[in-house]
Amino acid sequence: MANSSLAVRQLYEPERSLAFGGISGAYAVVGTPTAHAAHEVLWQNQTDAPITFSWDGTTAAFTLDAHTSFVSDVQSNRSDIGRINLLAAGTQFWVKQVSAPTLGSVYISVFYGANFNNL
């Protein structure tokens, strides 16, 4: 029988989004800070313009072209067993336009793990 204390399941925070009208040349907050340390984050730019994402509202982290997405799976490529790589709880996401979007939204989905015994 498997040790249930080792069983971890993936859980999800509520999706964060910001419609094109809230995106300008200045960084705008997307949703609330993360409530959990995340092992995977999905960023989607479903607007019709390139959008720059940031973790601090000042420094550009990366830019996504219109209608594209990016998955950051920080846990999948770990090199030393037992070490856990996670996006910190309390992380706030920000976006700004490269050129003005006229439709669509940006979406950010956060995935985290929880031990079955601690739910």
Image: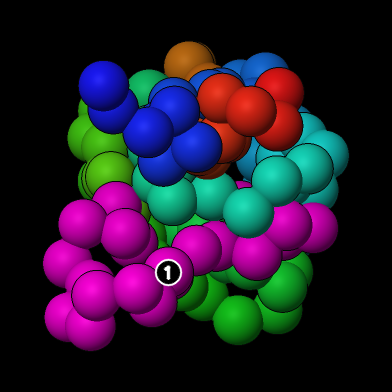
- Left/right of residue 118 with respect to residue 108 in the rendered view: right
Closer to the camera, 75 or 31?
A: 75
Q: What stretch of residues is rendered in magenta?
A: 73-102
Find residue 119 and report its horizontal and vertical position in percent. 71, 23
Q: Amino acid at mark 1?
A: Ile
- The residue at which mark 1 appears reads as 84
Q: What residue is at 54 percent from the left and 49 percent from the top?
A: 38
In terms of secondary structure, what is the magenta stretch mainly?
loop
Q: Is residue 94 visible?
A: no
Q: Position of residue 13 (x, y in %)?
A: 65, 26
Q: Quadrant of residue 25?
A: bottom right
- Residue 2 in view of the camera: yes
Foreground residue, 49 or 30?
30
Q: Position of residue 18 (x, y in %)?
A: 66, 27
Q: Is residue 104 above or below residue 108?
A: above
For the point 70% across and 46% down, the residue is 36
Magenta stretch contains residue 78: yes
Q: Using the image, determine if residue 50 lies above or below residue 8.
A: below
User: Quick check: 28 above or below 118?
Assistant: below
Please state if 19 lies on the left or on the right of 39 as rendered: right
